[in-house]
Image: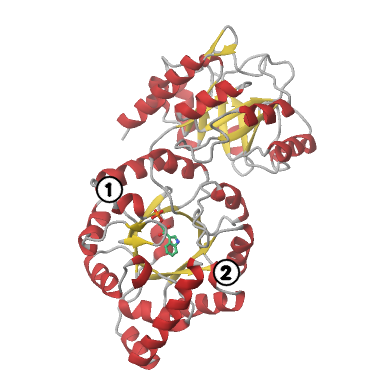
Amino acid sequence: MFLERIVTQTRIDLEQHKREQPLEELQRRVSEQTPARDLRQALSSRPQVNLIAEVKRASPSKGMLAPHIDPVELACTYEQNGAAAISVLTEPHFFLGSSEFLTAIKAAVNVPVLRKDFIVDEYQVYEARAWGADAILLICAILDDAQLSHLLQVARTLGMHCLVEAHSKEEAQRAISAGAMIIGVNSRDLVSFKMNPYLIRDLRSLIPADRVVVAESGIHTAADARRLARYDVQAMLVGESLVVSNDVPGQMRMLLQGANKSTQAKICGLRTPEHIDTCIEAGADLLGFIFHEPSHRYIEPRQVKAALKDSKLYNNGASEHALPDLVGVFVNKEAAYINEVAEELGLHYIQLHGTESPAFCQQIKRPVIKAIQAGSQIDLDLLLSYRDAAWRILLDTPTSEWGGTGVTHDWNIARTAAQTAQILLAGGLNPENVREAVLHVKPWGVDVSSGVETNKQKDSQKIRAFMQAVRNTDTIQE
Ligand SMILES: O=P(O)(O)OC[C@@H](O)[C@@H](O)c1c[nH]c2ccccc12
């Protein structure tokens, strides 16, 4: 098994390093280093998804990736194009890394440099610092609680932060309990190499707000990056898709834009597997299901399960499409009922479209999208009253009904709101006007229902046209 083999090899190397250079000598070299650069600050000082760009020539899962890259040149390209930190593989046998790469890169860039390796002994922590590393990776899967705490402690005394990597709920809990301030969620299982890009969605809510969260592995497209932005991570760690690219600056721009500059699109009121497939194919980010009986878009919760089961793309794990998140829309229902449906269907977000209070929102065991009616005047106080209780605010056109009327509201008001909160713009959007709406309001996301219908039924062509208009607008928005 790979992980076992690599740890065994690491221990053999470690003994040799210890013989060649006793700890005391290493410690002397450590004392000659300038203070470590602050990785935590580099990842949390800006309210955006930062990029940790990795220098990696090969990997055991993919074999040779870029055996001839010049590590220093690549790291400089990373820094010039907006990387917040550089991760350097130093493991020599399986990843073709080296301590020399790290030391040379550290001397050439001004951002924090992370030693990416299989650290199992405090000697390697001193070694990292002596080489110039500002931070180290600690992998929960190869450390017990005592080792994890001890290595965190040693790193702390040397002024280094640790990226503590988890691949399950249990490991995330262990990282949190050990006091890790930067927690990485690795989509790749280091034992089987199997990818689970959706692990971050499951683990994110377990991690307290004062920790920095890093999504790791398998991040290739703008859609991958846009998806991560929905989980409020502070950074993405990317190796392969950068090192194999023949346009590294372009690839970096695409990922950073995908995460930070593109518009999240929610298609609401879905009822059939065909339309779900259309949405996925067209790159929708959120799928909404209406659990409000008076609506013509009402769907019984158990029908959602069946529709998702019959959707070809939703169940195709190998699909090239980033799967959307599921949103259940409720109007003045009991919290217990909402929580039950959320659990039963595996909904990721709950949209509350009635007169639910902030206190009510807090009873919901999923992040809440709270719909607010955008009147002739923006009620900023109302909006702010949901700041702690709601994950996002959806601004809809005021109606005597409950929404979904196809009528737009004043986008100047929405624009002001979008400067105060992360909003989903809704109300009368359609393939023709969404571009102008996005450019004017600059919302976090857009929501559409009647604008992609014909005779009160979803229309695949309109869904595609809507999504295309949103994505085309993204590319011109810098
Ligand atoms: O190359 P990718 O798929 O973008 O992944 C980068 C990084 O997450 C990956 O290299 C990694 C994550 N955790 C590790 C632990 C050891 C070695 C390598 C890793």
Residue at the disc numbered 1: 245
Q: Secondary structure at mark 1?
A: loop
Relative vertical location of residue 282 with respect to residue 8 in this rendering, above or below: above
Res 414 visible: yes
**374, 235: nearer the viewer:** 235
Residue at the disc numbered 2: 179
Amino acid at the residue labelled 1: Ser
**10, 420: nearer the viewer:** 10
Quadrant of the drawing holding the C terminus: top left
Relative vertical location of residue 10 with respect to residue 372 in this rendering, above or below: below
Residue 222 located left or right of residue 396? left
The quarter of the picture where residue 308 lies is top right
Contact between marks 2 and 1 (CB within 8 A): the answer is: no
User: What is the tally of numbered marks visible in this picture?
Assistant: 2
Q: Secondary structure at mark 2?
A: loop
Q: Mark 2, residues whose alpha carbon is within 10 Å: few (<14), some, or many (≥20)?
A: some
Residue pictured at 60% horizontal, 10% vertical: 456
Residue pictured at 38% horizontal, 56% vertical: 62
In the rendered image, residue 421, in percent from the top left (x then y), is placed at: 51, 37
Q: Which mark is residue 451?
A: none
